[in-house]
Image (cartoon, rainbow, N blue to C red):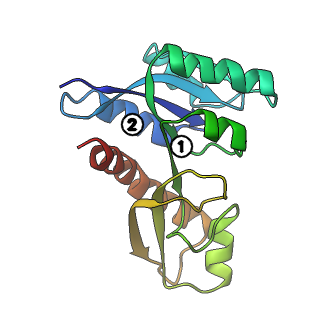
Amino acid sequence: MVKKNASVFISGEGSNLRSLIKNSRNYTFPVKISLIVTDNKNAIGIKYAKKYSIPYLIFKNSLISEKIILNEHLKRKISIICLAGFMKILSRNFIANFKKKIVNIHPSILPKYKGLNTYKRVLKNKEKFTGSTVHYVNEKLDSGKLILSKKFFIEPDDNVETLTKKTKEIEHILFSKSLIKIFN
């Protein structure tokens, strides 16, 4: 199987990155993680780049940085960008210039609860269910075409921490399933 080259954009601990790397080691998984990009030079997820010898770049807030990152994607023949807890909004120019695919994982069942502070809003509104969604990225925040989503029941004693944990467990499976769906 010829794997597609993928990049993963992160901002924090990189738990979805770790899951994607693990799955990419499977012969039948359709992508190889070829580049990691972060907007946080202190992101814990950088340790996975180092551990697995995957090149990484620090995304600074400038058009020069965007151009360098786009050029790296072209050079490495990246077929898909995976936004995995990446807390920076990509510019319209960046999205338009990466004519291939950009996908994001979001901790809610879209189109509900776009943006930040998802769990607090879900709890405040006394929702019965929440979950996670993988979607294509477009110019509007968390509004691209849906690829896959999975929901779970919110227990009466759930809080932000328990919802975070439950959602991450789903995300670690959902993101990989979405990539399989895209490329198979």
Res. 11 in view: no
Q: Is residue 11 above or below residue 149?
A: above
Label of residue 40 in the image: none
> Dot 2: few (<14), some (14–19), or many (≥20) neighbours within 10 Å?
many
**How many marks overall?**
2
**Residue, x 68% and y 45% (percent of image)?**
87
Mark 1 residue crowding within 10 angstroms, few (<14) / some (14–19) / many (20+): many
Residue carrying label 1? 84
**Residue at 59% from the left image edge and 36% from the top image edge:** 10
Q: Residue at x 51, y 33 (%)?
A: 8
Q: Is residue 174 above or below residue 5?
A: below
70 displayed left or right of 166: right
Q: Residue at x 57, y 17 (%)?
A: 72
Whether label 1 touches label 2, CB < 8 Å:
yes
Label 1 or label 2, whichever comes before in sequence order: 2
Q: Secondary structure at mark 1?
A: loop
Residue 100 position within the rendered picture, expressed as x and y whole percent measured from the top left: 48, 36
Residue designated by label 2:
20
Residue lying farthest to the right in this orientation = 62
User: In screen coordinates, is 72 left or right of 179?
Assistant: right
x and y, in percent, of residue 84 in the image: 53, 43
- Marks 1 and 2, how far apart in space? 10 Å
- In the shown orientation, is residue 31 left or right of residue 126? left
Give the x, y percent position of residue 127: 55, 84
